[in-house]
Amino acid sequence: MPERQSSRKDAIRNREAVLAAADALFTRRESPEDVTMADVAAAAGVGKGTLFRAFGDRAGLLHALYEARLEPIRQAVETGPPPLGPAAPPHDRVPALLDAVLCFKLDNRRLALALEEGGSSSPYRAEHYERWHSLLRAVLEQIPGLTGSDFTAHALLAATRADLVEYLAGEARIPRERIRAQLANFVTRVLASGPLQGLTAEE
């Protein structure tokens, strides 16, 4: 029993060391593609076998790191106060949710880009995307007269894609607060535009 507990503690320590090493590497490197599993294993002081057993592959490691960084936002969305929490009116909550997604990607540009570009299947099938889309669609459905919530959720989330955020903040060098203000203005205009005809899933 003591050996099993010690082994479990070692696994937890190794996982934390790997996530910390990956976090530092993705922050420092210019391109996400510059970070390899071998780099992460070396920085964490573990063998590559340990890394693959814990996370499966590079995509699994990226996902675990992404989820660890996202946890405070997820808690705020699920149980926190307005405007992110479930008690907020939908007209307040929709802009707050999108601002939270945008700020997260601004703060985690390289990691978000690596995760969205690294999947072999459609990024729209990724667990993290489907979770945000489902939440946003549900909140949009609470707005009287607004139709096409499924399409609208996709369209609004498109404004927070990691490649767009990387371009705006990196190549275009648009200041963070200006990007946030432009997104807020866009969301406000969409919500104030009235019913979106012809955009329901049935049509």
Image: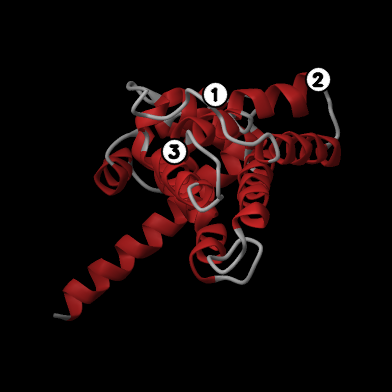
Q: Quadrant of residue 42?
A: top left
Direction bottom: furthest residue: 2
Q: Give the mark nearest the N terminus, 3 or 2.
A: 3
Tell me where residue 198 appears, x and y as whole percent.
Answer: 48, 22
Q: How is the image coloured?
A: secondary structure
Using the rendered image of the protein, determine whether residue 194 is visible from the camera's viewpoint: yes
Q: Amino acid at mark 3?
A: Tyr
Q: Earlier in the sequence, mark 1 or mark 2?
A: 1
For the residues labelled 3 and 1, the Cα–Cα distance comes to 24 Å
Answer with left or right where residue 105 lies relative to residue 57: right
Using a 10 Å C-alpha cutoff, classify the residue at mark 3 as few (fewer than 14 neighbours), some (14 to 19) or many (20 or more): some
Q: Nearer the viewer, residue 88 or 4?
A: 88
Cα distance, mark 1 to mark 2? 22 Å
Where 110 sits versus 33, above or below? Answer: below
Q: Is 123 placed left or right of 163 in the picture?
A: left
Among numbered discs 3 and 1, the one appearing first in the sequence: 1
The number of numbered discs placed on residues in the rendered structure image is 3
Q: Quadrant of the N terminus?
A: bottom left
Dot in front, 3 or 2 = 3
Residue at the spot of label 1: 34
